[in-house]
């Protein structure tokens, strides 16, 4: 057998294994969609946002269900993240019981956008294949946009979806 066939098959096998691992992490079963039974907060080891729930000092908003804070890489004059205190991996892990949480996240996002500006805002989630952190988070981007070119690339309909579409989709699953 020629060396380039062996190299090609080896490369294909490695690529397949890596892609399978990534796909399983994103779309596979989540054992972490729960409250930590001891403290009733998100408690997944290694999750950056679960750590924020426990130790974030610079919160913009907090209640019993969600916290909100400024994004470290803003795409708008005010770019906030609203995250649930309960660890939910991504949009695919949402259940019928989470409809109230999504509606609450939307109301918090709208209230924060009014508080920080009145030129309008975008409330969007990244689609599961494009999540940078595997903890559900709502982007609240209050206009004006500071990096409109990159915002159009990273927050378009291919990479993200508005919260209203997610709520409508979850409601249609309930019926």
Image (tube, rainbow, N blue to C red):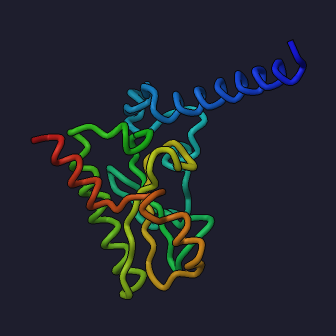
Q: Is residue 166 above or below residue 33?
A: below
Q: Quadrant of the C terminus?
A: top left
Q: Residue furthest top?
A: 1
Q: What number of labels is visible?
A: 0
Q: Residue furthest left?
A: 175
**Residue nearest the observer in this picture, 172 or 89:** 172
Residue under the image location 50 percent in, 71 percent down: 79
18 sits left or right of 82 in the view: right
Residue under the image location 61 percent in, 31 percent down: 19
114 sits left or right of 134 in the view: left
8 sits left or right of 29 in the view: right
**How far across and down, in percent of the image, does residue 18 sit?**
66, 29
Q: Is residue 32 above or below residue 149?
A: above
Residue under the image location 32 percent in, 65 percent down: 108
Occupied quadrant, residue 10: top right
Q: Is residue 31 above or below residue 170?
A: above
**How far across and down, in percent of the image, does residue 24 sit?**
52, 28
**Residue nearest the observer in this picture, 132 or 71:** 132
**How far across and down, in percent of the image, does residue 69 sit?**
50, 63
Q: Quadrant of the N terminus?
A: top right
**How far across and down, in percent of the image, does residue 92 sit?**
37, 39
59 sits left or right of 146 in the view: left
Residue under the image location 46 percent in, 27 percent down: 28
Q: Residue furthest right?
A: 3
């Amino acid at each position: 057998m020629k060396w380039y066939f062996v190299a090609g098959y080896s490369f294909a096998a490695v690529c397949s294994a890596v892609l399978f691992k990534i796909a399983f992490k994103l779309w596979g079963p989540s054992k972490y969609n729960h409250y930590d039974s001891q403290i009733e907060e998100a408690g997944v080891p290694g999750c950056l946002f679960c750590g924020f729930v426990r130790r974030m000092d610079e919160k913009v908003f907090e209640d019993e269900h969600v916290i909100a804070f400024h994004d470290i890489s803003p795409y708008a004059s005010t770019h906030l993240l609203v995250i649930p205190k309960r660890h939910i991996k991504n949009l695919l892990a949402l259940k019928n019981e989470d409809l109230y949480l999504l509606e609450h996240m939307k109301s918090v996002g709208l209230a924060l956008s009014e508080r920080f500006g009145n030129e309008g805002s975008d409330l969007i989630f990244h689609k599961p294949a494009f999540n940078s952190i595997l903890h559900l988070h709502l982007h609240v981007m209050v206009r004006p946009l500071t990096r409109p070119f990159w915002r159009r690339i990273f927050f378009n309909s291919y990479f993200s979806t508005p919260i209203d579409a997610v709520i409508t989709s979850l409601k249609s699953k309930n019926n």
